Amino acid sequence: MKRPTVNQGKTMQTVGQLLQQKGTEVFSVTPRDSVLHAIEVMATRHVGALLVMNQGTLIGIISERDYARKVILKNRSSHDTPVSDIMTAPAVSVTPEDTVHRCMEIMTAGRFRHLPVVKGGRVVGMLSIGDLVKAVIQEQTEHIEQLERYIAG
């Protein structure tokens, strides 16, 4: 009886492959929008961060963490503060060719939870730490199942 082979040469999932599964919808605000508007968009869209775009160009990112640390803790007005005052700029980004593991390394080193995906200067998606953790768990589950089949013969 021939034993199944274990695919040891399997490459790690790329950002592009993950976006094919997840989708490429992104939400954004402009640097002139109020922080209140940005928070309303995050709440409506059920996301923790938004891209800050200026005429189609990524110039930064604004997250709930930016809001908490740069508005709430400093007793600033959400209505009167423009996004440009609290956004993180420039935004760290990845390409569709980067691997899921590389994205996790970048997020861990930078201590942030969202990564825009850029190809040819154009935003093509956004990843959260949750997207990456889900992808890694799926990859590990598949590997475990493959090893179990190999062992069982």
Image: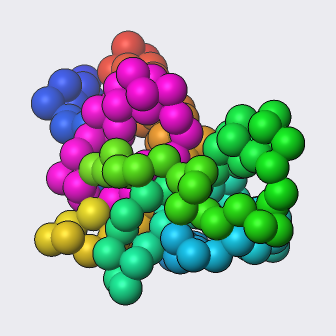
Q: Residue furthest top?
A: 151
In the displayed structure, 35 sits above or below 14; it is below
Q: In this image, 93 relative to 28: left or right?
A: left
- The vertical placement of 56 against 73, above or below, is below
Residue 146 in the image, given as x and y percentages of width and height: 38, 29
Identify whether 19 is placed above or below 33. Answer: above
Q: Nearer the viewer, residue 72 or 52?
A: 72
Residue 113: percent from the left, percent from the top? 55, 39
Asked if residue 121 lies in the magenta stretch, the reply is: no
The residue closer to the viewer here, 115 or 55, is 55
> Within the image, what quadrant is residue 75 found in?
top right
Q: Is residue 140 placed above or below 122 in the rendered structure?
A: above
Q: Residue at 36%, 68% (x, y): give it.
A: 58
| Span highlighted in magenta in the image | 95-117
The quadrant of the image that shows the C terminus is top left
| Residue at point 14%, 30% (across, down) | 9
**What x and y, as percent, mark residue 110?**
42, 28
| Whether residue 17 is visible | no
Q: Quadrant of the N terminus?
A: top left
**Residue drawn at 52 percent across, 70 percent down:** 31
* Of residues 92 and 4, the one drawn nearer to the viewer in this rendering: 92
Determine the residue located farthest toward the bottom in the rendered image: 55
Whether the magenta-drawn stretch holds residue 97 is answered as yes
At 64% from the left edge and 76% from the top edge, which residue is drawn? 33
Q: Is residue 45 left or right of residue 59?
A: right
Whether residue 6 sits left or right of residue 40 in the image: it is: left
Q: Quadrant of residue 24?
A: bottom left
**Residue 25 visible within the image:** yes
